[in-house]
Image (cartoon, helix red, strand yellow):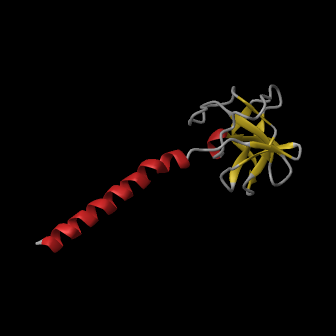
């Protein structure tokens, strides 16, 4: 009977320790901000994310015209704008200006960037 109590106590201690690890995981998983280095703003992003065409009249991103992709991660960005089409996430209308891997300039959806984009300047 003492053996069963010892096993139960050990299992409870392991469960409590596991619960503490899980409880702290969200804080460590929070997105860090983009950072400035070598004349560019760098952010962690989804590899293969689409880069969209800026409208020729007002520069607002065309959410249906892909001009390239960004396969690198992290990638560099120039600035952001808040007046693009809805993308969801914590910044529902934010688009971030960059150059796609094929050399064409355009906007990436903020939801394709893991890093917090608030440190970037406004376009």
Residue 59, quarter of picture: top right
x then y, percent, for residue 85: 65, 31
Instruction: Name the spot of residue 35 as percent of width and height, x first.
Output: 76, 43
Q: Is residue 67 left or right of residue 12?
A: right
Q: In which quadrant will I find the C terminus? A: top right
**Residue at the (63%, 46%) spot, across then down:** 114
- Between 99 and 23, the one lying in front of the other is 23
Residue shown at 42% from the left, 48% from the top:
23
**In this rendering, is residue 77 above or below 92?**
below
Give the farthest residue toward the front: 2
Q: Quadrant of the N terminus?
A: bottom left
Left or right position of 1 against 66? left
Residue at horizontal 14 percent and vertical 71 percent from the top: 2
Residue at 89 percent across and 43 percent down: it is: 39
Relative to residue 59, is residue 24 depicted above or below? below
| Viewer-closest of 120 and 105 | 120
- The x and y percentages for residue 13 are 31, 60
Q: How many marks?
A: 0
Farthest residue in the left direction? Answer: 1
């Amino acid at each position: 009977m003492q053996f069963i109590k010892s096993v139960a106590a050990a299992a409870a201690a392991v469960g409590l320790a596991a619960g503490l690890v899980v409880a702290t995981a969200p804080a460590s998983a929070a997105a860090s901000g983009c950072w400035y280095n070598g004349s560019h703003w760098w952010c962690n992003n989804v590899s293969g994310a689409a880069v969209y065409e800026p409208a020729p009249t007002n520069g607002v991103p065309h959410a249906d015209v892909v001009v390239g992709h960004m396969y690198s991660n992290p990638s560099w960005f120039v600035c952001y704008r808040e007046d693009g089409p809805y993308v969801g996430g914590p910044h529902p209308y934010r688009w971030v200006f960059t150059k796609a891997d094929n050399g064409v300039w355009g906007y990436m959806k903020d939801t394709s960037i893991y890093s917090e984009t608030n440190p970037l300047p406004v376009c």
